[in-house]
Amino acid sequence: MASLSGVSASFSCVKLESLIYKPSSRASHSQTELFSNSARNRRRNVERGFSVRCDARFDKDEKTDSKASRIIALEQLKTTAFDRYTKEKSSIVVIGLSVHTAPVEMREKLAIPEAGWPWAIGELCGLNHIEEAAVLSTCNRIEIYVVALSRNRGIKEVKDWMAKTSGIPVSELQQHLFLLYDDHATKHLFEVAAGLDSLVLGEGQILAQVRQVVKISREVVGYGKNISGLFDRAITVGKRVRTETNIAAGAVSVSSAAVELALMKLPESSLSSARMLVIGAGKMGKLVIKHLVAKGCRKMVVVNRSEDRVTAIREKLKDVEIIYKPFSEILSCTAESDVVFTSTASETPLFLKEHVESFPLASPEIGGVRLFIDISVPRNVGSCVSGLSNAQVYNVDDLKEVVEANKEDRHRKAIEAQLIITEESKQFGARRESQKTVPTIMKLRACAEAIRISELEKCLSKLGGVPNKTRVAVDGLSRGIVNKLLHGPMQHLKWDGSESNDSRTLSETLENMHALNRMFNLETEISVLEQKIRAKFEQNQK
């Protein structure tokens, strides 16, 4: 931190313009040799053409400063941390793991319940290089989306945070994490919302979960315009994919896959007689009940903390006998069941080895072995239960067996969906790129305004006692001149989102931005990023 404080002092006391070496006949040979060839090339690029200095406080006496001190200051600047910051761009980054990259044993340690999402956003945005954040945590994935002011430093901070909150060493996490940024991060979230990255292709529950991220995070400080814009667009893309490709037709959810898996493991002769128990009547549990009914089940026991949800389900399924039991009777209900579906938000296991060992054997019709289908993350059934002879335990990772069905048809629909996602990702990325011109627009206008006011004051002071009416007229004249001069450049910094032949392309708009930055020495990207990083450090040092 000491070095950063020194850097901050250097930035506040030495103007960047004064650090640029300017050759003259008085410069000594030894001074000139301090610059490498690459430095000369960079200097020639800066000095090429006419450059307007827009700092109204620029003092001509600075030209008398010792060139040697300028050279030393510049060399110091090159080696500072802040100089390295300015060579990086802020990025949208996603860091996470999913059913495709990590086992459930690891995912459950990183899982963050919905109630904890605002806390996680606050924690992440408290890191030095993270400006915005969002958390998507489901039974199949835990993904952290951030806007990193410095990509590499931000990624490291998020990994360290994940390791700290989960208790898993970074070296172990690293083997299972995936990392995507900018366009690739955008495309990934669009694929997630469309159901293309799900264990069950096209399943609709993930889109509802993405909506839940927006609903919960909307009022949280740190869920900023970049991340919120990304999630809002992802919802739109998810709906569009399902509408235009029909990818959800015939698709199965995690809950329906769980029911299918249970039926696959049961003897056919026992399908109608097996005693069914559903623990948890939330979204997942409700879907399990519906799919059991669709498969012909007409009686089941549902254990839940409150009866209200079970009553609501019972009213919609009047032809089915749904028996409610409170959570206090979970063990006795399980002892009287053959197939147990668990889908609660409990952060600790509901069933341990000693519980299951004490249960009587399941019905002879199913072979005396009780089935546990655990679709919760963290898991409701402890891993210690898996080794028992009187129980067979399956979790969300075991659903892949069901998902393999109808692979060819799902692959065809996925190709159609990818075309939409590629188009949407390109548009979102282009619009985000176009926002880079906003700081240039603001700085160019501020630059012109500073010059206008400075010249206006000089003019009025020379004229002496000027009537207020004349002063207002001259002020209006100067504003009009500045606005007309800026009109052309401002128009060329705006992109309408199209790539038609009669409009500017995004590439041309960005080229115009870079040209104006060079001509007027605005250096917007560097200064905006630098200001944000400084503010973060100052905030965290308090």
Image: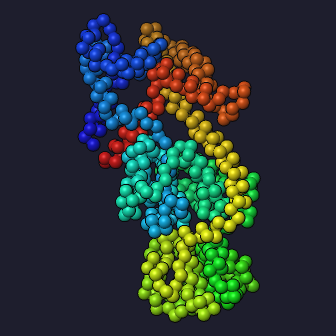
- Measured from the top left, where is residue 529 in percent x and y? 43, 36
Q: Is residue 476 depicted above or below 187 in this figure?
A: above
Q: Is residue 300 depicted above or below 514 in this figure?
A: below
Q: Quadrant of the N terminus?
A: top left
Figure label count: 0
Question: Which residue is at a point 43% across and 36% down the rendered structure image?
Answer: 88
Task: Please state which of residues 209 and 256 is positioned toward the viewer in this rendering.
Answer: 256
Q: Say whether residue 90 is visible.
A: yes
Residue at the far top in the pictured view = 25
Query: In the figure, residue 198 lies in which quadrant?
Result: bottom right
- Measured from the top left, where is residue 169 in percent x and y? 36, 60
Q: Is residue 69 depicted above or below 182 in this figure?
A: above
Query: In the figure, residue 123 lies in which quadrant?
Result: bottom left
- Measured from the top left, where is residue 59 in percent x and y? 34, 17
Side of 102 where 235 appears, left or right: right
Task: Please state which of residues 533 and 36 is positioned toward the viewer in this rendering.
Answer: 36
Question: Which residue is at a point 42% across and 39% down the rendered structure image?
Answer: 532
Task: Please state which of residues 418 and 3 is positioned toward the viewer in this rendering.
Answer: 418
- Measured from the top left, where is residue 502 in percent x and y? 72, 26
